[in-house]
Structure formats: C-alpha cells, structure tokens
DNA sequence: GTGAAAGCGCTAACAG
DNA sequence: CTGTTAGCGCTTTCAC
C-alpha cells in the first residue's frame, strides 16, 4: 500500500455536518434530484466550510463513468503523435480536464487496425474518447459501446459528433485571395493522402480553379518542410510559369520558401506562397508567411467539454479559419 | 446514471475461472504476497484468456493511489500554460501515462501562491505531480503530503527529485563555441527573471566571459520573439561593436535575426546569433539558427515514469544538451 | 498458501 | 422530500 494520504473530508463528513444523510448530500451536490431548500443550503454551507472535494475515483467506480479522456490519434505509424498540432490539442484537453479532475492520455490509433477502439470501449477507466485525424474507416469501425462518449476533431458520423475547421471554406478563402491579388497559375501542395482533410482542401481548390477556368496544378506533400521543398521543386519543373503556391501546411510553406530562395525566385514578386495553420514562426519567416489561422484550442476545448459533459451537441460544428495576411502572398 | 457500459471481465471472473478466491487472484496479479506456483499459473492463464484489465478507478479507490498526474506549471500568470514547451511536456506525459491507464491534467501554479499545492496534496485523485518552472519558493512550500509523489523538471530539493537539462553546461558550450569561432564581444539576452534557469545561464555566461577576460553584456528578455528584437536593439545601442548575440531561447533568437536584418547587419558575418531550445523552425530560418537541443521528451518521460512508479531516483538527474551547429553562428 | 470479510467514497434505486 | 440499502471492483488485514 502506498503511504496513506492525509485524511480528506468525505461526503459522509459533509452529510454529518449538515445533519442530513449521505444520499441527500450527494443529491444536493450533484445538483439534480429532490432536496428541500433548507437541506440544500445546509449541505452547501457544510461542503464549503469543510472544503469538500469529491473523490473522482469513487464517483467513477459508482457510476461507471471513467476517470480519463483518451486522445486517440489516427495515423499510419506511431509517430503521428509527435506533431505540434497534437501537442496543442492534448494541452488544451488537459487544461479543460483539470477542471473536472480527470486526466488525459494519448494513444496512437493505427489506421488499419481501428478495432483497437474496442479496447477503449471496454476499458472502464475511459470516460471519453477524442479522435484526431478521423477517417471514414475508423468511423465505420466505431464500437457501439463508445456511442455518446466519443467526439472527433475532423469528420464525424451520426454516432460521433464532429468539431472541425471549415477546411473547404478556408481553402477557398486562400485560393480566392491569391486569385484576387492577380495570380492565375496557382499550384497546390496537398497533405497526406490518407487524411480526410486533404480531400476537402483538394476539392475546394479544384472547384475554385475550375470555376475560374484556371489549370489545376496539384502535387502531393506530407506536411513536412522537406516535403514542401520537394513539392515546390516538382512544381517549378512541371509548370515553370507558376505564379503562386498554396502549401497545405505552414511547415511545407516554409519549405517552399526555402526552395524558392535557393532557386533565386522572389517571393512574393515572382511567386506568391501561402501556408495553412499559422504556426508560431510563420510570422517570423522571410518573407513572413500569409496563412490561415485555426482556433485549435477553441475546437479542442469544445470537443472535450462536450464529451465530458455528455452534452447533446449538433452532429457537426464548423469553426471558421482566419486569413492571416502577411508578406508572402 | 450514464448508459451502462458493456460488462467487462472483472477480477471476480478471473478468480472463478482459475478456481481461486478473489484475494488470491489479486495477490498473484499484484505480483507480491504468497501464492502457490499452481495458483499463480492458473490465475495468469485465466487473466490472459479473459483479457482481464484491472479497473484503475477501483484500484485507486481501494489503495488511495490516485488516477491522474497533474502537470503544474509555475508562473506569474495563467498564460505560462500556453507555451510549446509545456505542450511537449504534457504530450510526452500523456503518452507515458496512457500505458498505465492514468491521465494527465494541466494546471497553472501561481508563483506567489504556492499554497495551491496543498489542494493537490489533499486531492485523492492525484497520483503524482510534475512541476515545471520550479522555483525555490515553491520547493519551500511543498506540502509533506506530496513527498514521494512529486518530481520537478527544473530545480529540485531533497523531497522533490529534479530532472533537468544541464543548463549551465549548455550555456558554456554555446558561449565557448562563439569564443572559439573568434567572437570576443558576446552579448546575452536572458530569460525572465523569476525562472531559476535564467540565473544558471547568466552565471555560466558570466563565468566564461570573466575567465576569458571579456566584457559582460547582458540584457533581459522574456522568451518571446518581440523581446528578442527589443533586446537586440538595446544591445546594438549600448554596445555597437558587439559581434555575437546569445539569446536564451530560439524565439528570442529568431527575433534577433529579424532585428538585425532590419538594421542591415549581416548574420553571421557581422554578428553571430545563437539560440537555445532547437524549436522545429530553427532549421528553417534565414540564416538557419545555431542553437542547443534539449531532450525534453526524454526528460519528461523519465520524470513521469519515476513519479508513477514511485521509483527511488537520485535527487537530481542532469541531461546533456546538444550543440546544433547551423549557419547563424 | 488461501479465503472470508471489511471497506475505499460515492451513487442510485427504492421505500417511506 | 428524505433516509435506507446495496453495490461499483479492487486491495488488504486476519484467521484458518
């Protein structure tokens, strides 16, 4: 046995001090269930005086509610966890969870083994699951036991509410901006194929371009700076007259900037470059990066709050992204 | 009551399948306490077959061990939580914790109200505490009830083991490198005054400079890019012949680069610039930033593992930082 | 070496 | 509106 912790005030103590039964105290503190104003009052006072704080473990055991929120990040390999975006989500989640005395744990969800979710479904310590990089396949494999305690930052389903940036709208805004500033031969470096958001960005880009009667110039990327450099060189090779590059992540955009500099191409004079994400250093690059900013923390907070409170939420909540105009486009 | 979760296999089930009592099964699974080889074997088999996983909440309730790890970040204001460094630590912690089915929550620890720790000490859901930006004052205010379940990334005390980068050594390496590459008028932009690591970097810098008979040129910074710009301008003003700037964070170094560019100063030809941290974009700046890389994830993992396992660890573990030579110095 | 029994702190029927 | 009662799943004395 671990060294005993200092005796903490328990619900029993509160009840005794308030002169009611434990159940009544429980009801009052829980907020629902019947309770006379006087009882309600005495319990509240006693709890405040004694500095009562419920024991989450006991509560979890009694209700079967679970004590932790699992952030499950889908991806082809465990290294998807090592991404500043994941860091931001986990941090926001850990902050929200702290208020409710629950903790966050972080796991990789193999793209091709969505049955791993079953383990989470059966684990009674799991209060809720937040899925990142959600794919159709994962949604299809979602165990029913997870219904009502799973949310997605990304695509959703009837059983899994979605909280996400309006990626399509954001892409249209960026491409629209490039168009309005006179660019006509706009290339795009997309993200990894397996990510659903990639498709949405690609579709939005293609729509805008086709509507404007402009050529599609699309090369695949991988969200890394190296990938951005490679993609940019590929674009320069295939379509030398390109006058704008929309990289679907800031890391790739920064890579694009590096590649162009090395080639002696002036940004934005010869070629405009736009990124996506607004990472901290997008403002510090040379030239400073025009990009789209996403309220990641706000989204994560809303998603986590929804799952912790078992709130009824709309099947999909879209968050606007903001165009951040700087020097590069 | 939340919708009932699917029935999970419980210790009772395992015991029944193994033909022993719950207590015996518990002992076997816990690993200590007496048990005949045969019982030991049957229980292990049954547990494996049934895919038994203990319920952490129940265990926590029975042992009083707690179900979450709190990452407490010391600082003057709640916004200390919003820092990529904190994100990295929390993410690493959440990854390690997942293996033990515990969660992480993140809290601000007011610099001037270390008594907040008492709340954590009394909270029976808290399995352990990881303190960031630890100060002497906080160590002094540490409740005894937290002994044995608290670790620090930063300075430590007899009661609180420390896991930290050898900041002094790292600073000596950086300043030494500047010296060896011929710089003699080396200025430093330090971090916030209240952070203990600031003092260590300052001391190391001063030692090296004094030993070499060189002038001390120190300006305060705040770890932000804006602060780095301001600090650099101040340095240029006060000591126009400065030939190197050591910014105590990459953000400040990047700010320094921006300020110097604006002033038409060539880096590294006129002035060398070195950073500290090796953030992802240090490699992408122009010129690419020479800096020191710290094994943040490794440190966090070790610290969290130590506190979760109640391991006996040395009072202080120092991790080496690595000099990352790039273009700026 | 093993099992019976008590209890961790809380919630939620269910009678009154 | 309130108290009684029965657990949630696990650990841990303490007799046998």
Image (tube, coloured by chain):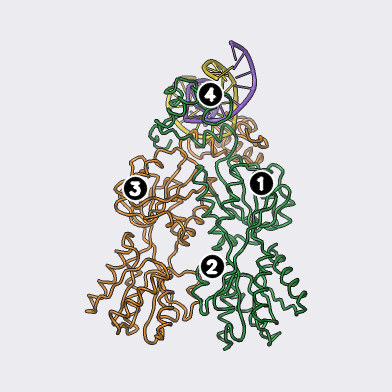
Chain colours: A orange, B green, C yellow, D purple
Q: Chain of mark 1?
A: B
Q: Chain of mark 3?
A: A
Q: Provide residue D16's location: percent of width, then percent of height.
A: 58, 10
Residues at badges 4 and 3 in contact (C-beta under 8 Å)? no
> What whole-number distance in Å separates the C-alpha atoms at marks 3 and 1?
38 Å
> What whole-number distance in Å separates the C-alpha atoms at marks 2 and 1?
29 Å
Label 1 secondary element:
loop
Which residue is denoted by mark 3 in the rendering?
Answer: A113
Q: Chain of mark 2?
A: B
Q: Which mark is residue B23?
A: 4
Which residue is denoted by mark 1 in the rendering?
Answer: B313
Question: In which quadrant of the rendered view does residue D13 lie?
Answer: top right
> What whole-number distance in Å separates the C-alpha atoms at marks 1 and 4?
32 Å
Label 3 secondary element:
loop
At a point 54% along the width and 31% down the height, the residue shown is B30
> In the rendered view of the protein, which quadrant contains the N terminus of chain B?
top left
Q: Residue furthest front?
A: B180
Label 2 secondary element:
loop
Evaluate whether residue A57 shows in this view. Answer: yes
- Discs 2 and 4 carry the same chain letter: yes
Q: Is residue A276 left or right of residue B213?
A: left
């Amino acid at each position: 046995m671990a060294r005993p912790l200092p005796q903490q005030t328990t619900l029993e103590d509160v009840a005794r001090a308030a002169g009611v039964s434990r159940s009544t105290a429980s009801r009052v503190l829980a907020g629902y269930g019947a309770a006379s104003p006087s009882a309600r009052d005495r319990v509240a006072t006693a709890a405040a005086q004694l500095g009562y704080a419920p024991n989450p473990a006991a509560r979890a055991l009694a209700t079967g509610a679970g004590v932790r929120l699992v952030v499950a990040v889908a991806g082809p390999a465990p290294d998807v966890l090592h991404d500043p975006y994941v860091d931001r989500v986990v941090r926001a989640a850990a902050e929200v969870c702290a208020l409710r005395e629950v903790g966050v744990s972080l796991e990789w969800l193999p793209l091709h083994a969505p049955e791993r979710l079953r383990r989470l479904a059966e684990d009674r310590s799991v209060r809720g699951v937040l899925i990142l990089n959600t794919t159709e396949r994962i949604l299809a494999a979602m165990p029913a036991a997870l219904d009502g305690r799973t949310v997605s930052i990304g695509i959703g389903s009837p059983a899994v509410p979605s909280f996400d940036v309006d990626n399509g709208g954001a892409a249209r805004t960026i491409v629209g901006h490039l168009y309005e500033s006179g660019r006509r031969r706009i290339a795009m470096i997309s993200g990894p194929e397996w990510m659903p958001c990639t498709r949405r960005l690609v579709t939005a880009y293609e729509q805008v371009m086709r509507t404007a009667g402009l050529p599609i110039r699309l090369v695949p990327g991988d969200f890394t700076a190296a990938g951005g450099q490679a993609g940019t060189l590929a674009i320069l090779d295939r379509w030398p007259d390109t006058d704008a590059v929309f990289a679907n992540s800031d890391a790739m955009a920064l890579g694009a900037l590096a590649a162009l500099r090395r080639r002696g191409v002036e940004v934005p004079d010869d070629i405009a470059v736009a990124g996506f994400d607004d990472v901290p250093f997008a403002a510090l690059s040379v030239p400073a990066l025009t990009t789209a900013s996403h309220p990641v923390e706000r989204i994560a907070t809303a998603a986590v709050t929804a799952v912790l409170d078992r709130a009824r939420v709309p099947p999909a909540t879209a968050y606007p992204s903001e165009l951040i105009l700087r020097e590069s486009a």
